[in-house]
Amino acid sequence: MPLSLIGFLAGHVAAAVQRQSPPAKEPLVVAAARTVGVKRCLPTISAIAQRATAGATMQDIIVDWDRKVPDEAPFFSLTGLGNGTMRAVLTIAAIPAPAGCAVLVERISFAARDCASVAASDLAGFPSGQLIAGIMVYQNPKQAGETYSLISNNNGCLILRRQASLNWGQ
């Protein structure tokens, strides 16, 4: 068999193997940011989205950006996430800054149990304070700029995880 035919067949086998194992999907917000021209904050958006969307089997997004200078202006996104019957939203605001990106990330979800049990199981040891009646805010002692707000409702607990950084990754 001529070498060119062997190479041709090997190429088809490699292509077939690649089709059988699809590449890992990147979060929609990363693809959207890249598509609209965000470059400086793209690594930050990607790092955040990879962690925050892990396990989601459904995603959809809404984004807003400065169409004239997309890489020099704020990028805002709202990502809807789902897995089975569970739902959450993720917001990312990334703003180019001299030393990287200023970022505000919020992930909002719901637990069908009271907030006291959420706090006991997930936020034990976190300092806390009451914002107003029915809303407790917990500070992550290991991560400056990360808070968890637990909002009591009749049917459960609304959980708002918030991270803010003026120089993400610095």
Image (spheres, rainbow, N blue to C red):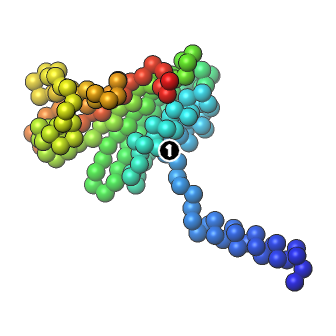
- Image coords of residue 122 (percent x, y): 22, 41
Residue placed under numbered mark 1 in the picture: 28
Between 120 and 69, the residue placed more toward the observer is 120
User: What residue lies at 55% left-to-right and 22% top-to-bottom?
Assistant: 100
**Left or right: residue 73 compared with residue 118:** right
- Image coords of residue 14 (percent x, y): 70, 69
Quarter holding residue 38: top right
**Left or right: residue 82 compared with residue 29:** left
Tell me if residue 118 comes above or below residue 86 in the rendering. Answer: above
- Which of the image's four quarters has the N terminus? bottom right
**Left or right: residue 85 compared with residue 133:** right
**Which type of secondary structure does the marked residue at label 1 adopt?**
helix
Crowding at label 1, few (<14), some or many (≥20) Cα neighbours within 10 Å?
Answer: some
User: What residue lies at 35% left-to-right and 23% top-to-bottom?
Assistant: 145
Quarter holding residue 135: top left
User: What residue lies at 42% left-to-right and 43% top-to-bottom?
Assistant: 51
Q: Amino acid at mark 1?
A: Leu
